[in-house]
Image: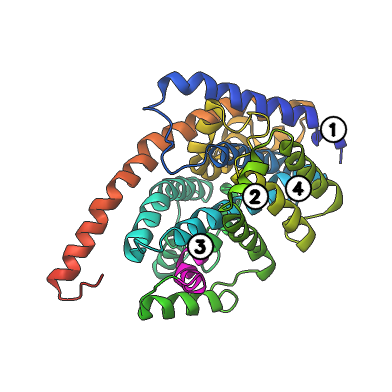
């Protein structure tokens, strides 16, 4: 395989184009970037992580077009653009919600409200992405039903449940999973952590109702048998939990906020790429955890993570994560053509990656503004409706 597909210069140029596109979109932003209760450094980190996953899958497509095999990149850097980016996403989740648990000593946590909020945060854009994926899959299977209605319904329900039981074929076509570049694999891990939070709260010596505690403990224990999760991929959540603990100490935050600590972040990330083959090893998880703890403690890597354009990329991260695979699939299947793209040189392929960067950021912005935000704003009304329904049926609890 021509090693020039794994171009550091190409990746750097793509990051720059994405950042500049976000910068140009800032005047059209719907309002001020949120700050209350948010860490600017983590907000800025998110966008770069999601875009790293886009680059990871872009070079995988180069190999896939020529071999028909969807395999990790041969380059350690581009492999970690996917592995380490998702591992850091898991750390962000664990950090934010562990912090919420640790801060709940007085107020407590309304678990139903939290889970409804998570559902309304994640499901709307996920539903849009999956609907587009299903439409593409049906087009590629000639708009003819290839399985019984019952099987099709089962496949549909599996996708609506965040592929918790695994990503099923669509209309008997196994390739549907790759239309979204396979990104849905990470969502069951996120939901496992959310549903295990009552157990984490009890371990943290917070008051938890017996029913919620039993639910959380059972959920946490069923990571293998019930959720079919790989235990080694849970290591980043441990790193996020540890980061939530250490960043509560003012001394650590003062240390992390120093500019020279940015060198520590960069050094840890470079060591992960140089020393490990995947993010899901104890060594890689430890190095990533150190880097993340410094960022969560306030280090902005010499201002890169806290600037407005980086934070805007962070706001549109979820849409970017879900739609980048669809954009690549549509481009290769319907715009360029699979055979033509398979004959391209690495330079031509990189030209396409750079060219798709601008529409990708714009589509992600649109998804955030017109799908994600309305879903978030509807969350309190959804919770209130559920609460009133339970009261009307005599099953309301706190």
Percent across and percent down for residue 244 are 57, 56
Nearest to viewer (mark 2 / mark 1) = 2
Whether residue 258 is visible, yes or no, is yes
| Dominant SS type (magenta) | helix
| Residue at the (75%, 28%) spot, across then down | 10
Q: How many labels does the image show?
A: 4
Q: Which residue lies furthest to the front in this view?
A: 251
Report the coloring of the rendering.
rainbow
Q: Which quadrant of the figure contains the N terminus?
A: top right
Measured Cα–Cα span from mark 2 to mark 1:
34 Å
First of labels 2, 1 by sequence position: 1
- Residue ID for mark 3: 163
Measured Cα–Cα span from mark 3 to mark 1:
35 Å
Percent across and percent down for residue 312 are 50, 31
Measured Cα–Cα span from mark 4 to mark 3:
23 Å
Q: Is residue 273 above or below residue 239?
A: above
Q: Residue 4 carries which label?
A: 1
The residue lying toward the viewer, choosing from 365 and 27, is 27
Q: Residue 293 carries which label?
A: 2
First of labels 4, 1 by sequence position: 1
Does residue 126 show up magenta in the picture? no
Which range is magenta?
191-205
- For the residue labelled by badge 1, is the local secondary structure a helix, a strand or a loop? helix
Nearest to viewer (mark 4 / mark 2) = 2
- For the residue labelled by badge 3, is the local secondary structure a helix, a strand or a loop? loop
Percent across and percent down for residue 29 are 41, 25
First of labels 4, 2 by sequence position: 4
- In the picture provided, is 380 more to the left or to the right than 170? left
- Residue ID for mark 4: 79
- Contact (CB < 8 A) between labels 4 and 1? no
Measured Cα–Cα span from mark 3 to mark 2:
30 Å
Nearest to viewer (mark 3 / mark 2) = 2
């Amino acid at each position: 395989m021509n090693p020039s597909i794994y171009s550091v210069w190409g990746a750097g140029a793509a990051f720059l184009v994405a950042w500049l596109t976000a910068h140009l979109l800032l005047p059209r932003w719907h309002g001020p970037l949120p700050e209350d209760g948010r860490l600017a450094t983590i907000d800025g980190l998110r966008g770069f992580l999601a875009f790293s996953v886009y680059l990871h899958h872009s070079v995988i497509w180069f190999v896939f077009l020529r071999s028909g095999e969807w395999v990790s990149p041969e380059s350690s850097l581009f492999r970690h653009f996917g592995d380490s980016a998702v591992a850091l996403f898991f750390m962000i989740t664990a950090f934010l919600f562990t912090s919420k648990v640790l801060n709940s000593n007085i107020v407590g946590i309304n678990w139903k409200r939290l889970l409804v909020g998570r559902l309304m945060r994640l499901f709307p854009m996920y539903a849009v992405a999956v609907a587009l994926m299903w439409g593409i899959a049906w087009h590629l299977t000639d708009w003819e039903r290839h399985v019984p209605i019952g099987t099709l319904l089962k496949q549909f329900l599996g996708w609506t449940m965040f592929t918790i039981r695994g990503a099923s074929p669509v209309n008997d076509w196994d390739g549907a999973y790759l239309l979204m570049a396979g990104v849905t694999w990470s969502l069951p891990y996120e939901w496992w952590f959310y549903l295990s939070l009552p157990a984490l709260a009890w371990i943290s010596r917070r008051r938890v109702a017996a029913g919620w505690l039993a639910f959380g403990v059972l959920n946490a224990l069923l990571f293998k048998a019930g959720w079919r999760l790989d235990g080694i991929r849970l290591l980043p959540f441990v790193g996020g939990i540890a980061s939530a603990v250490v960043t509560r100490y003012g001394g650590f935050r003062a240390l992390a906020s120093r500019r020279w600590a940015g060198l520590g972040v960069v050094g840890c990330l470079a060591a992960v790429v140089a020393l490990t083959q995947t993010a899901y090893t104890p060594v890689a998880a430890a190095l990533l955890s150190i880097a993340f703890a410094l960022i969560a403690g306030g280090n902005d890597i010499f201002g890169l993570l806290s600037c407005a354009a980086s934070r805007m990329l962070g706001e549109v991260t979820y849409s970017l994560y879900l739609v980048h695979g669809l954009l690549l699939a549509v481009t290769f299947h319907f715009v360029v053509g699979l055979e033509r793209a398979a004959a391209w040189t690495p330079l031509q392929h990189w030209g396409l990656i750079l060219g798709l960067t601008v529409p990708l950021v714009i589509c992600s912005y649109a998804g955030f503004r017109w799908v994600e935000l309305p879903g978030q704003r509807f969350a309190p009304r959804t919770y209130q409706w559920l609460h009133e329904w339970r009261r009307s049926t005599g099953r309301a609890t706190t």
